[in-house]
Image (spheres, coloured by chain):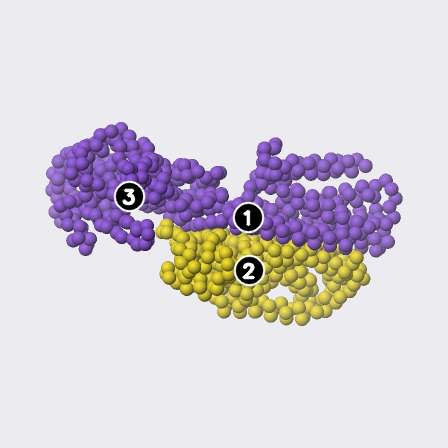
Amino acid sequence: MRFIRPDINIDFVGRKKIAFILSIACIAISFLSLIIHKGPRLGIDFAGGTLVQIRFASPVPIDDIKSGLATIGVSKSSVQQFGQQTDNEFLVRTEISHGSDEGFAIGVKKALDSINAGEVEIRRVEMVGPQVGEDLRKKALFAMFYALLFITIYISGRFELKWMLSGVVAAALIGAVYVFNLFNVSIPFLIGAALIVSLVVFWFLELKYAMGAIVALIHDVIITVGIFSIFGKEFTLPIIAALLTIIGYSLNDTIIVFDRIRENLKKYHKKPLSFIINRSINETLGRTVLTSLTTLMVVVALFVLGGGIIHDFAFALIIGIAVGTYSSIYVASPILLAWQNRGKK
Amino acid sequence: MKNFSWKLILVFTVIVAAVVYVLPTFEPGLWPHKQINLGLDLQGGMHLVLEVDTAKAIEGQVERIAQEIRDQLRKERLRRVSLNRIDGNKISATIQDPQTLEKFDALLTKDFDFLKRSPRTEGDASIIILELPESEAENTKKLAVDQALETIRNRIDQFGVAEPDIRRQGEKRILIQLPGIKDPDRAKDLIGRTALLEFKLLDDTGDVNTAVKGNVPAGREILYQVKEDKDTGKVTKLPFLLKKRTLLTGANLTNARVDFDQFNIPFVSINFDKKGARDFERITGDNVNKRLAIVLDDTVASAPVIQEKIAGGQARITGDFTLEEAKDLAIVLRAGALPAPVNVLEERTVGPSLGADSIRKGLISMLIGGVLVVLFMIVYYKGAGLIADIALILNIILIAGGLAAASATLTLPGIAGIILTIGMAVDANVIIFERIREELALGRTARAAVDAGYNRATLTILDANVTTLIAAVVLFQFGTGPVKGFAVTLSLGVIASLFTALVLSRLVFDYILGGRKVKTLSI
């Protein structure tokens, strides 16, 4: 069986303008959503606060829960349905982290016992104090930063087979981060700065493959974060894990296309680059589609069947895999082409 | 086929090792006694991060030193020195006349030379600021955390939790993991309370009512007795005017246990050690007909009138305890007081029913996702798809074996990692198969196509997987709890899929193609 015929020849490169506009639009919308929502919506892992997951034996209108909670003065809390409608499960969240005083969970249970909606079960309590929230925020950002750093170094070394240059990139990055650190800047800024530095270094050292890969990767992460923001989903520790996985996955696709381009450059050295790129994408298309398909199968299974706790994590992966597949075809490779055209202008 | 046989041995060894490691998880007691542990999010339980308020430990120590200096002053009959604790951790001594200053100085040099002294004059009076030296303060902080760790461990042991994990985290944090705990709030209360037991005399000359209004005499304090009506839940607070001086503390206890009075109401009976018994006898003897307050964490538990001198070193703490409260009080008194209060910085509690749900849902997703992929591969690649499927199943066994061998913890994101691996693991095979199909299309023989397919795809596969591995390793470094579980299964999955695709499925192809002249390949 075969989805993709071996002699397939879709003109991907010819559509790069449409793809370019589409990508820019998606990134713009992502940023717009982030600006409107004043940054990503942080879950209690990062913002601090308390979350209680409760389950009723029978259906209860959400307004009853809200009015029940109002009686114990946790009115500054939000209540939302959790999982499927039939689960009768809800999340109660408040920004306050109740440290040593009587637990928020007990208060919630007492309040909900009083609304006579039947048995209330406390299934999960998560409390993160402001200090720990800040620690976790730092840790998450550092994880993103180091993942990007190592991947940048690996790509610049591996793709151009110039490990010396990769050393230069690493030194430039570490130097830049060190200098920025002297000014005590925030970590998101640090990550942004590190990315810009690596792109500039790639540009001057003519590491075009690394450039393409990193641009595709930034593209994927921004759009995933943007879609999360548009859907009003929260950023938690597992979501950061999903983002890192997406980074790895997106590169995976890109690397396979790039490897083929390198191979075909030797094979068809008289043909123009646009032909070689297009041919390489077409040759690897079967694999790209297939792997994305099998990965999507399992992730969708997880999304549908995995339950509320893992739901958003699976959602992030679905978006990431879809966007990652698109970007390895339409973002990473056209950048190689843009590079070549650079000299002609 | 020398090459073929060492590979066969390698594959066989790896698979057997994985199976041997996986078995004890299902049949406990088998060698090598290594199991896959379930994370708290799967088996239910409580995860707590506490912070020891070490500043309070310093304050407590400084207060004790101030008390010792006062005692010394009384012995030496130096009356014109007033001592006050300032800024929490310093003592300010105000001395009115030079003679006393000289004697006071001598006393400090003799007994309290370890304190840093900074003298100055203010009008006629001399003021000496006494401070703990930095090294001593650091030591106190460290000791406070060590002691808190030990005390909490004792309390949890006595409370009875199977396989608790209690460890220090950073400078002053304590991480506690209690798997399968039934009553998390009770456990939290038991762990978190300071349990400082103090005996203080009531000031029966002063007026409580004026003191409550803010006019507390020197050396006195207002503490409350809190009573909760068990039926209405109404809380009443009764103020007591106490002498600030602590006569005896729970540090002198040897035992505490629950007992019942003639109305079958529980109370906690305590036994003092030798010094405590002697002190208690003296205190009760000196203060017959006065009221002695039993203070627990700055709350008055009871304040009985001393009827007579009590010898024998036994006392009872009464109060409106439920049996459970009395039991917990006995535990915390036996385990000892925390050297400083602790604050809960992070709490994550998962009920057992939710954990079981997560396992069930995780396994169902894994099964459905896995079956979909397996069927798809067979339909799409036929015979070769079957090889990929065998590789996939072995892949999962290898991940499980790896988890068990490392005694790693399986969490819900960890299961998600395995599910993701199932989807991604076939990738390596897909790359190879697509390559083989291309080579076949170029008109090569089956043998040549397989060889070329593997040779050309190997580097690409390695490259593509290294990036995922980098992400997973970074995640492992920075992740906590459940996320770490994801990093573990993802890394294991990547490594296992490299092995199964590059070594194992190759071996199967070699076996099929070996010897006979195979014309067509089912791919």
SS of the residue at dot 3? loop
Q: Tell me the quadrant of the picture where the C terminus of chain A can be found.
A: bottom right
Q: Is residue A43 above or below residue A345?
A: above
Disc 2 residue type (three-letter): Thr
Disc 1 residue type (three-letter): Ala
Whole-percent x, y for residue A231 in the image: 55, 65
Q: Which chain is purple?
A: B
Q: Tell me the quadrant of the picture where the N terminus of chain A can be found.
A: bottom right
> Which residue, given by chain and number where applicable, does mark 2 sit on?
A86
Residue A198 lies in quadrant: bottom right
Q: Residues within 10 Å of mark 3 (few under 14, many from 20)?
A: some
Rendering colour (chain A): yellow
Whole-percent x, y for residue A272 in the image: 76, 64
| Cα distance in 3D space between marks 3 and 2 | 46 Å
Q: Considering depth in this image, is B415 or B443 the residue closer to the camera?
A: B415
Residue B353 seen in render:
yes
